[in-house]
Image (spheres, rainbow, N blue to C red):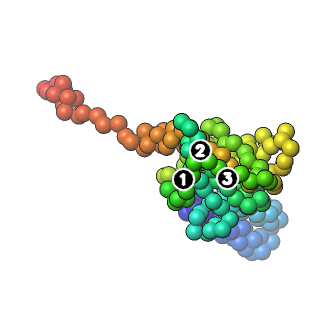
Amino acid sequence: MSKKQKWSLVSAVFLFVALLGLALLFESELFIYAASAIPILIVMTLPDIKQHQYIQRSKAQGDIQVYKVANGDEPLLVISFQPGFVRWHCKKLYFDINELHAESIETLPADGDAASIPVLSFDLSAHPRRTGWFGINLAQLSQRTVNLSYTTQEVNRFIVHMKDLESIALTMMTSATPLVTNNSSNNSNSLSA
């Protein structure tokens, strides 16, 4: 919950109590009607229940394995997890590539009951505030599984192309680096009176 949301919540509760107090003091129905609208504002300022899921290696020790697979010229990042680990009702699944410590292997171990979903470049995004964190759009992935022979609850592997992660990281770095301008040339062209 941000500071703005906290102050909005505190002020809405204070306004509600003040309007109820005024309604009792002046015995006015108008203040009661106004006070009855305030809980709508209070509900709007409450934080949402976890819109995003975060994969953190320290919290999910046995639940998740991460591999870097050398797939010829296109290396892959494979995030393997237990079925049901991903909360599909969330908007995004965020992970930090630096924290996951992916194990490098030549080929992916064969698993008879593995249900994999490829994560395409348009499914990936950068976290708006945390650097180095990448997000997977779960709504798009669940939409693609509608035509598959398995459900989202059976999925236990995400396959991500490393070049897609590198391109997002590159755009993150270029957007974070400010352009350097030379002010000395601007000062020499100024007119003096």
- Determine the secondary structure under disc 2: strand
Quarter of the view holding residue 149: top right
| Upstream in sequence: badge 3 or badge 2 | 2
The residue that appears at 70% across and 59% down in the rendered structure is: 81
| Upstream in sequence: badge 2 or badge 1 | 2
> Which residue occupies the foreground of this view, 178 or 159?
159
The residue that appears at 60% across and 56% down in the rendered structure is: 66
Q: On the rendered structure, is 160 left or right of 88?
A: left
- Determine the secondary structure under disc 1: strand
Q: Which residue is mark 2?
A: 76
Which residue appears farthest toward the left when viewing the image? Answer: 193
Amino acid type, callout 2: Leu
Q: Which residue is mark 3?
A: 109
> Which residue occupies the foreground of this view, 11 or 31?
11
Quarter of the figure that contains the N terminus? bottom right
Amino acid type, callout 3: Pro
- Determine the secondary structure under disc 3: loop
Q: Which mark is residue 104?
A: 1
What x and y, as percent, mark residue 34? Answer: 77, 61
> Which residue occupies the foreground of this view, 146 or 35?
146
Amino acid type, callout 1: Ser
Q: For marks 3 and 2, give the CA distance.
A: 13 Å
| Upstream in sequence: badge 3 or badge 1 | 1
What x and y, as percent, mark residue 138? Answer: 71, 48
